[in-house]
Image: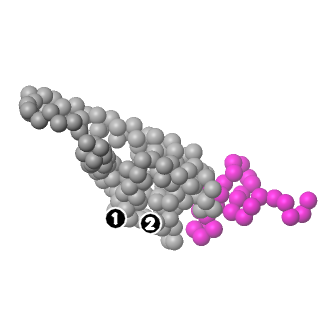
């Protein structure tokens, strides 16, 4: 029937591709972004585990004794949580800023899936500082008890340009290099 068919921005040949209306490039599907994040998470997790073991071994001989037996307050526990989350995010922030900010715009996970981060207006690389800002936005969402992080991560499912909130803030898109 006339009037029915795929919405604008979709190509019907092969898999359902969504073409960016501004860059005229295939946008990365959500599942590729998810797998890339999981791959990068394994890499960062292994690196963090090695660093943690090294620090634990170095500190094993330096146990501190204290006579302060006061119970922890909610404020001190919350402060420790936020502090550890922020400190623990530094290596990942640097990794994502260097890799996503490079000319390729790809982390190891993105390379494995054939997707890349690009400037939403020009299609070029976003550079180190925008890539760092893109990652730090997700860190802030994670620190805010995961609900904003989950919504940010799911946003590409319903956004016309498949952008997460952190993509919108820094004007980036994730494109599919192997559609």
Q: Position of residue 44 (x, y in %)?
A: 34, 41
- Res. 19 image quadrant: bottom right
Residue 19 covered by magenta stretch: yes
Front residue (pair 19, 57):
57
Instruction: Kindly identify which residue carries mark 2.
Output: 170
Q: Position of residue 51 (x, y in %)?
A: 23, 37
Q: Is residue 130 left or right of residue 21?
A: left
Q: Position of residue 79 (x, y in %)?
A: 27, 48
- The reply to whether residue 80 is visible in this rendering is no
Instruction: Specify the segment rendered in magenta.
Output: 1-28
Q: Residue at x 25, y 45 (%)?
A: 76
Q: Residue at x 72, y 64 (%)?
A: 8
SS category of the residue bearing label 1: helix
In this view, 19 is above or below 39:
below
Front residue (pair 158, 68):
68
Q: CA distance from mark 2 to mark 1?
A: 10 Å
SS category of the residue bearing label 2: helix
Determine crowd level at label 2: few under 14, some 14-19, many 20+ residues with C-alpha closer than 10 A.
Answer: some
In this view, 179 is above or below 56:
below
Q: Which mark is residue 129?
A: 1
* Display colour scheme: one colour
- Report the magenta stretch's main SS: loop
Residue 103 covered by magenta stretch: no
């Amino acid at each position: 029937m006339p009037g029915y068919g795929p919405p604008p921005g979709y190509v019907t040949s092969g898999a359902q591709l969504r073409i960016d209306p501004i860059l005229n490039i295939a946008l990365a599907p959500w599942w590729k972004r998810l797998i890339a994040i999981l791959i990068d998470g394994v890499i960062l997790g292994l690196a963090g585990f090695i660093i943690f073991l090294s620090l634990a071994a170095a500190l094993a001989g330096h146990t501190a004794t204290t006579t302060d037996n006061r119970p922890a307050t909610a404020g001190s526990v919350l402060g420790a949580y936020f502090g550890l989350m922020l400190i623990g995010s530094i290596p990942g922030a640097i990794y994502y800023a260097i890799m996503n900010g490079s000319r390729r715009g790809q982390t190891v996970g993105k390379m494995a899936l054939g997707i890349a981060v690009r400037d939403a207006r020009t299609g070029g690389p976003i550079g180190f500082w925008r890539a760092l800002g893109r990652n730090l936005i997700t860190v802030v969402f994670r620190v805010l008890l995961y609900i904003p992080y989950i919504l940010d991560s799911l946003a590409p499912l319903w956004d016309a340009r498949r952008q997460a909130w952190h993509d919108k803030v820094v004007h980036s898109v994730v494109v599919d290099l192997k559609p």
